[in-house]
């Protein structure tokens, strides 16, 4: 589907994302809930160790995120990277640890081509002291990048993990007023246009409703905007 990219290019791209992430992280979170802070961060993924042959050293486990969502509830995103014939896979897994209960959600099973995705951005929100929502943005580190998004909803009654449809060089737009309604932006067109990072593209928007156990998305009628992917590279999650 996508060609492997030189590792020097990947490192440069992640360094750029990391610089933007530090700027984002400097802005204090705001939340109407006392003692509960909203957060929005762009991340620089940790790179796997490489062998002398240029391949990923097998057997690695890389923790890309470790977040305490609430007392006794820990969220981790871990990778088990592998060198593939045409495309490296990272096999990202969301692990939810709540007390003695542990659940693992492999992106490769939740999203088509999800095994190639890496975590690049997070946004968390507090609706009340015992209700929080966490959005995770993942991306393929290659030309013609595709994005995957996960939504974790926490309450005193339990935790729910859902995913949105895959997007091409796109983003999600989250409204603080209603976290259950999410816009999903994705480029469309021929593969040659999708693979051209610098080319402006036609974007379609899907309106997604995030429920407790499912996500429903439908195309927004009459929306076909021409945008540059560069507009989205600094924030795969836009918060309004």
Image: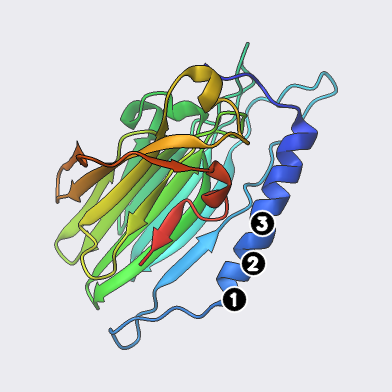
Q: Is residue 53 above or below residue 188?
A: above
Report the side of 18 relative to 36 (left or right): right
- 3D distance between C-alphas at marks 1 and 3: 13 Å
Instruction: Where is residue 207? Give x, y as percent.
Output: 22, 46
As rendered, which of 165 and 64 lies closer to the eye?
A: 165
Q: Quadrant of residue 188?
A: top left
Q: Is residue 198 visible in the rendered structure shown here?
A: yes
Q: Quadrant of residue 142?
A: top right
Residue depicted at 29% across the width and 50% down the height: 183
Q: Do residues under tags 1 and 2 come within 8 Å of each other at their CB atoms?
A: yes
- 3D distance between C-alphas at marks 2 and 3: 6 Å
Considering every residue shown, the one lying at the far bottom of the view is: 34
Badge 1 element? helix
Instruction: Where is residue 113? Give x, y as percent.
Output: 43, 24
From the image, tell me which residue sits under label 2. 22
Q: Is residue 216 above or below residue 3?
A: below
Instruction: Where is residue 88? Give x, y as percent.
Output: 61, 23
Q: Is residue 84 above or below residue 93?
A: above
From the image, tell me which residue sits under label 1. 26
Residue depicted at 69% across the width and 37% down the height: 48
Badge 2 element? helix
Q: Which mark is residue 71?
A: none
Report the side of 55 relative to 184 (left or right): right
Q: Is residue 49 visible in the rendered structure shown here?
A: no
Residue depicted at 51% across the width and 45% down the height: 119
Q: Do residues under tags 2 and 3 come within 8 Å of each other at their CB atoms?
A: yes
As rendered, which of 233 and 61 lies closer to the eye?
A: 233
Instruction: Where is residue 19? Give x, y as percent.
Output: 69, 60
From the image, tell me which residue sits under label 3. 18
């Amino acid at each position: 589907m996508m060609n492997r990219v030189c590792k020097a290019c990947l490192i440069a791209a992640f360094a750029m994302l990391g610089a933007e992430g530090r700027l984002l992280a400097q802005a204090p979170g705001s939340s109407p809930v006392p003692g509960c802070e909203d957060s929005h961060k762009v991340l620089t993924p940790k790179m796997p160790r490489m062998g002398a042959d240029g391949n990923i050293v097998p057997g690695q486990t890389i923790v890309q995120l470790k977040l305490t969502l609430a007392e006794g509830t820990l969220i981790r995103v871990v990778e088990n990277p592998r060198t593939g014939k045409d495309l490296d896979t990272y096999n990202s897994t969301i692990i939810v640890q709540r007390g003695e209960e542990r659940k693992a959600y492999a992106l490769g099973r939740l999203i088509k081509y999800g095994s190639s995705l890496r975590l690049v951005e997070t946004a968390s929100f507090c609706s009340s002291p015992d209700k929080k929502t966490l959005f995770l943005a993942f991306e393929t580190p290659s030309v013609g990048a595709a994005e995957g998004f996960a939504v974790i909803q926490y309450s005193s009654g339990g935790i729910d993990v859902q995913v949105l449809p895959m997007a091409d060089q796109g983003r999600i737009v989250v409204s603080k007023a209603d976290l259950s309604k999410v816009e999903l932006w994705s480029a469309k067109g021929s593969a040659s246009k999708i693979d051209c990072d610098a080319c402006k593209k036609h974007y379609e928007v899907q309106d997604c409703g995030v429920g407790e156990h499912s996500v429903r998305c439908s195309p927004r009628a009459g929306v076909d905007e021409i945008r540059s992917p560069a507009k989205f590279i600094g924030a795969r999650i836009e918060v309004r």
